[in-house]
Amino acid sequence: MAGGPRRQYNNPIIRWIEYRLPIVSTMEATLGRDMPTPRNLNYWWSMGMILTVALAIQILTGIFLAMHYVPTAEGAFDSVERIMRDVNNGWMIRYMHANGASLFFAAVYIHIMRGLYYGSYKAPRELLWILGVLLLFIMMATAFIGYVLPWGQMSFWGATVITNLFSAIPLIGETLTTWIWGGFAVDNPTLNRFFSLHYLLPFVIAGITVLHIWALHVHGPSNPLGISPKGKHDTLPYHPYYTTKYLTVFGITLIIFAFFVFYEPLYLNHPDSFKPADPLSTPSHIVPEWYFLPFYAILRAIPDKLGGVIMFIASVAILFLVPFLDTSKVRSARFRPIYKQFYWIFIADVLLLGWCGSQPAGGIALLLARLGTVYYFAHFLLVMPLVGWFEKPRAIPEGISKPVIPKERAGFTAETSPEAAE
């Protein structure tokens, strides 16, 4: 703001730029350098950093891949092979992009599960949660479209099966499917449209991520106790305390990511992905990427085509309503003994649905998928409201610092703590 106090920088170049355009101080405020942060955040809160790095990896590697990719039904598969064999370090860029998607979804699922356990979606952070679910929706669309681009057997038939589902929508289904295809079957126009959208949507994700971070900074992050900081003794500056703490998680994640890129880059791939698309040969078992498996199991669990589409969309859309379905006044599951048990049942249910989605549609897998689907929706529509009404929570600490600071310092208050004396 004009005339207001500004941070003084030692670097003369940064100081010159900052005086004319306060971009450095704005970035520091956005990234939370000086943001008072609850002093009890654990390593589960590091997923935001991992997701930011994963998004940057996907955008950068995607740009380089797009330079050599040919978005035609005749040339797509061969162009991917050429990237792998002839482009300098093309194999590494492609493996980073493919495994980066798995890293992205693994981090976002941990991020969501942490939010569900610690009640990070509750007031006043409802919009923060809703923006996060919107990001999940767009991520899933982007990942599915990207899965189609290599134009292998699994890519082609995955696109055929999923886009055909839109035809079940009453009145507009057939028209909508034809528009998505750009014709009367999955072919060259479909691939061109998917390529354009796959290149565009990551930048949409980046823009909504900025809003997500902005919403986070309005009321600050939640914390494992689910209580608001009472003063300076309950908070720490984000930098250097949490930046250095989360660098540990970042280092471990980078090692795991590098292991998959350099040693097991194809571990999560299906063999049919290495065969060129053939419209005349249907794979015996169409399997999506692992991060779609629970939702794919829900889709197949419904015998009716339209019903399956509705339940598939609802399985993600219901997350938008979580802040309004949970009736408990207590945020953290640490103090909710009944909800905590249902939470772990829900986690087991999602893992079960993931296994069912990886199996052929029939037999015990189909039966378990239907049971898992029933509990998936029951958890949100029944368990969350009812447990919130009838559960008797445990006693909640008066402040963050008492459970965190050692006993010999537990007597400190806002007036007597070293932080307050500054």
Image (cartoon, rainbow, N blue to C red):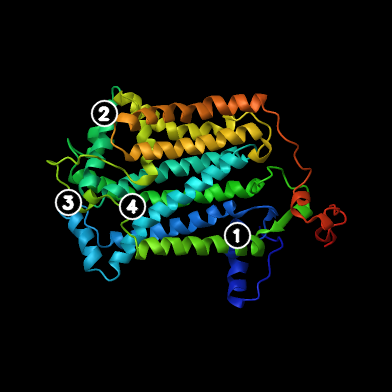
Compare marks 1 and 3 and give the one earlier in the sequence: 1
Look at the numbered disc 1 and give the secondary structure of its residue. helix
In the displayed structure, 392 sits above or below 153; it is: above
Q: Please state which amino acid type lies under the numbered disc 4.
A: Leu
What residue is shown with label 1? Answer: 26
Select label 3 or label 2 by which is in front.
Answer: 3
* C-alpha gap between disc 2 and disc 1: 47 Å
Label number found at residue 325: none
Q: CA distance from mark 1 to mark 3?
A: 49 Å
Q: Nearer the viewer, residue 195 or 113?
A: 113
Please tell me whether mark 1 or mark 3 is closer to you in this view.
3
Q: Nearer the viewer, residue 362 or 208?
A: 362
Q: Give the answer, above or below, for where 422 lies relative to 404.
A: below
Identified by mark 1, the residue type is: Thr
Q: Nearer the viewer, mark 1 or mark 4?
A: 4
Which residue position holds label 4?
A: 268
Q: Give the SS element for disc 4.
A: loop
Quadrant placement of the C terminus: bottom right
Ranked by sequence position, the earlier of labels 4 and 3 is: 4
Alpha carbon separation for disc pair 3 and 2:
26 Å
- Number of marks present in the image shown: 4
Give the mark, 3 or 2, whose residue is nearer the N terminus: 2
**Which numbered circle lies on residue 167?**
2
Q: Nearer the viewer, mark 2 or mark 1?
A: 2
N-terminal of the pair, mark 2 or mark 1, is 1
Cα distance between the residues tagged 1 and 4: 40 Å
Q: Marks 2 and 4, how far apart in space? A: 30 Å
Query: Residue at left 18%, top 37%?
Result: 185
